[in-house]
């Protein structure tokens, strides 16, 4: 069993997760972001929770008519609690003991005698408990309470929260013993993790029952359809993830957890197959998912319009969580490629440098400069184009925070034979009897040096993931290591052209540039005077440079009607002038919108051949 486990600690699997104390990020790309999360983002979130009354709902639960926030606002208090637990306990973390004591007391104080805990239901003047199966979010919130309590129990950072969570879980198990489930999955992985902490089999059984009950069209009919809630087809019979993206991914996470603990290999294989198909047909180049704004949902296969990319931050967080679980269960290092991509192109893009404003949705093509959101009140919808300090629906902020605080546990695994390093960052690792120091400038540079600080007298295997863009597979060093030994990996971090499958209609005829795991984009602020992002073509016959590509500026014709009786790809000028050759500067996609409002595009139209 792993000591000081992080958020996920399966009892079986090909690889074992490392505990929170086994990895210490020591700077670099992720160490710096983790530090900002600990010193700025957690406090920032707490200020907004207080300001908007979402913590106040717990303090004064009987003031039903004055309850503030949406039906899921309790979950933000729990997710921030989880983040603060990991941050307080991780090596080098920033302590948040006062927040944790206060939030634990809030949850305990608002809990009903029978264990039910939600500030929005069941009191005089409030809707009845469980009266809105589709959108009530009661078990969803309970799930986040359980995950916070798991973090509290594993870190010792918030004594007392586990008791609150057990009473809430016991209530849910009694109430949903025979039927029913929540419109928003989340309690499923939470119950499995609570089972892993407490050994209570009924929590695992309840999670399994929730998953089996779903998919039979038993939720009330809704305009978004049963697919939105993953209630159209039983999960084990589905072929691809669909419906609301975060719901679908949280359900898949819970299903992997259940499958691993119960030995349900069919369920595990089904989820893995659906994830593969989703990656192959329903995922943006950034690793983001969800191309439908109306219902925050997956689109059909290959329906991936860049200017309508929803790609919610939470869906990115959930993809990391799912890929990590499948990596542990199967040992297939290719899942590390998914984590790498999502971390560098969704998670890194989501948070401002100061840790105090955020993207909820991640467009891949900003056609007009966005307004800067006001600092004094929350953004009412998902926004886009500029990071906002808070949202009416603020799920993504606390979600990124808990991921960053526990990030070390996602980078490395171990087994009886040795250590597997899946993600590269400057860090100290203690696993499988080895103490290692990893030095690297990743993702900007591809050299990775693993220095052995301490080693057992027996043979160990050190496995390093080689990203698909550098050839794929793994590099394995197997020997009796000694202190001072070095293992070097040199990944060719070079700019490269990337082309879409022709069935991704929205970007047919376009190309993108990637450098290592980082997707690049063109941002208007960097372009030469007069060059517009919707009037350029890039020349893929010329190799991309580190931060620029060659192309030309075209002069599209403004006809009264934009549809013509022939292809006009080459009809670029009424005057017959040769288009002007230009250099198109690029920046990492995760850096965009940090210098004021701008237009931006990842997919660049190519010069017709
Ligand atoms: Zn979200």
Image (spheres, rainbow, N blue to C red):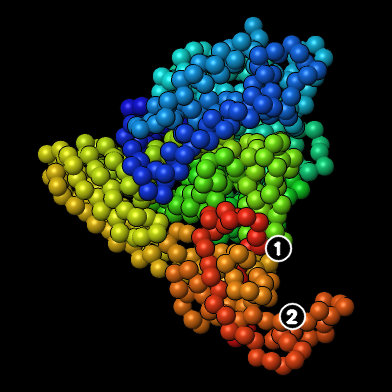
Residue that protrudes farthest toward the top in the picture: 113
Q: Quadrant of residue 21?
A: top left
User: Where residue 71 sits: x, y (%)?
Assistant: 72, 27
Q: Quadrant of residue 470?
A: bottom left
At 42% from the left and 29% from the top, the residue drawn is 94
Q: Ligand 1 near label 1 (Cβ, under 8 Å)?
A: no
| Res 420 visible | yes
The vertical placement of 591 against 389, above or below, is below
Which quarter of the figure is the N terminus placed in?
Answer: top left
The vertical placement of 406 against 495, above or below, is above
Asked whether, in this view, residue 388 is left or right of residue 400, the answer is right
Instruction: Find disc 1 in the rendering and name its residue.
Output: 367
User: Where residue 568 sits: x, y (%)?
Assistant: 74, 84
User: Where residue 358 sits: x, y (%)?
Assistant: 60, 44
Task: Give whichever of 2, 203 is nearer the camera.
Answer: 2
The vertical placement of 271 against 304, above or below, is above
Mark 1 crowdedness (10 Å alpha carbons): few <14, some 14-19, many ≥20: some
At 81% from the left and 17% from the top, the residue drawn is 65
Q: Are marks 2 and 1 in contact (CB under 8 Å)?
A: no
User: Where residue 349 sits: x, y (%)?
Assistant: 55, 51
Instruction: Find disc 2 in the rendering and name its residue.
Output: 556
Q: Quadrant of residue 140?
A: top right
Task: Give whichever of 70, 458 is nearer the camera.
Answer: 70
Q: How many marks?
A: 2
Q: Ligand 1 near label 2 (Cβ, under 8 Å)?
A: no
Sequence-wise, the earlier of marks 2 and 1 is 1
> Could you give the CA–CA distance between mark 2 and mark 1, rounded to whole angstroms?
16 Å
């Amino acid at each position: 069993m792993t000591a000081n486990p992080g958020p996920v600690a399966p009892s079986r699997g090909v690889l074992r997760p490392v505990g929170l104390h086994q990895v210490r990020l020591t700077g670099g790309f992720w160490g710096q972001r983790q530090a900002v999360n600990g010193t700025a983002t957690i406090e920032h979130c707490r200020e907004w929770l207080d300001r908007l009354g979402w913590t106040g709902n717990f303090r004064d639960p009987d003031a039903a008519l004055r309850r503030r926030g949406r039906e899921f606002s309790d979950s933000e208090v729990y997710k921030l609690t989880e983040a603060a637990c990991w941050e307080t306990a991780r090596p080098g973390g920033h302590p948040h003991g006062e927040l944790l004591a206060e939030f634990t007391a809030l949850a305990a104080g608002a809990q009903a005698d029978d264990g039910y805990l939600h500030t929005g239901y069941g009191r005089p003047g409030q809707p009845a408990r469980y009266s809105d199966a589709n959108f009530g979010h009661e078990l969803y919130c309970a799930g986040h309470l359980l995950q916070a309590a798991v973090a509290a129990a594993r870190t010792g950072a918030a004594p007392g929260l586990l008791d609150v969570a057990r009473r809430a879980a016991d209530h849910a198990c009694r109430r949903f013993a025979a039927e029913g489930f929540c419109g928003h999955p989340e309690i499923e992985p939470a119950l499995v993790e609570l089972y892993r902490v407490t050994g209570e089999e009924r929590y695992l059984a309840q999670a399994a029952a929730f998953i089996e009950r779903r998919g039979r069209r038993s939720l009330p009919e809704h305009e978004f359809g049963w697919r939105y809630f993953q209630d159209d087809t039983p999960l084990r019979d589905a072929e691809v993830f669909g419906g609301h993206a975060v719901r679908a991914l949280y359900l898949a996470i819970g299903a992997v957890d259940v499958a691993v603990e119960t030995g349900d290999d069919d369920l595990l294989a089904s989820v893995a197959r659906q994830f593969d198909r989703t990656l192959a047909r329903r995922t943006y180049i950034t690793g983001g998912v969800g191309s439908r704004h109306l219902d925050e949902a997956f689109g059909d296969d290959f329906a991936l319009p860049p200017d309508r990319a929803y790609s919610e931050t939470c869906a990115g967080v959930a993809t990391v969580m799912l890929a990590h679980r499948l990596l542990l269960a199967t040992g297939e290092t290719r899942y590390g490629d998914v984590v790498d991509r999502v971390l560098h192109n969704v998670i890194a893009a989501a948070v401002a440098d100061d840790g105090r404003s955020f993207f909820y949705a991640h467009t891949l093509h900003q056609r007009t400069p966005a307004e800067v959101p006001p600092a004094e009140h929350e953004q009412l919808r998902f926004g886009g184009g500029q990071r906002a300090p808070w949202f009416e629906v603020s799920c993504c902020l606390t979600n990124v925070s808990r991921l960053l605080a526990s990030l070390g546990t996602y980078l490395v695994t171990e087994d009886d034979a040795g250590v597997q390093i899946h993600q590269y960052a400057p860090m100290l690792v203690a696993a499988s009897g080895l103490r290692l120091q990893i030095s690297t400038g990743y993702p900007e540079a591809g050299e990775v040096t693993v220095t052995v600080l301490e080693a057992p007298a027996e043979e160990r295997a050190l496995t390093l993931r080689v990203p698909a863009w550098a050839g794929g597979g793994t590099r394995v060093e197997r020997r009796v290591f000694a202190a001072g030994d070095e293992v070097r990996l040199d990944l060719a971090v070079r700019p490269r052209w990337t082309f879409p499958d022709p069935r991704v209609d929205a970007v047919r005829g376009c190309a993108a540039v990637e450098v290592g795991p980082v997707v690049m984009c063109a941002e208007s602020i960097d372009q030469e005077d007069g060059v517009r992002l919707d009037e350029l073509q890039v020349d893929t016959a010329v190799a991309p440079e580190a931060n620029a590509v060659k192309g030309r500026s075209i002069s599209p014709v403004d006809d009264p009607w934009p549809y013509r009786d022939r292809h006009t790809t080459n009809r670029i000028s009424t005057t017959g002038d040769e288009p002007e050759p230009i250099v198109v500067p690029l920046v990492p996609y995760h850096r965009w919108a940090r210098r004021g409002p701008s237009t931006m595009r990842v997919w660049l139209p190519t010069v017709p051949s």
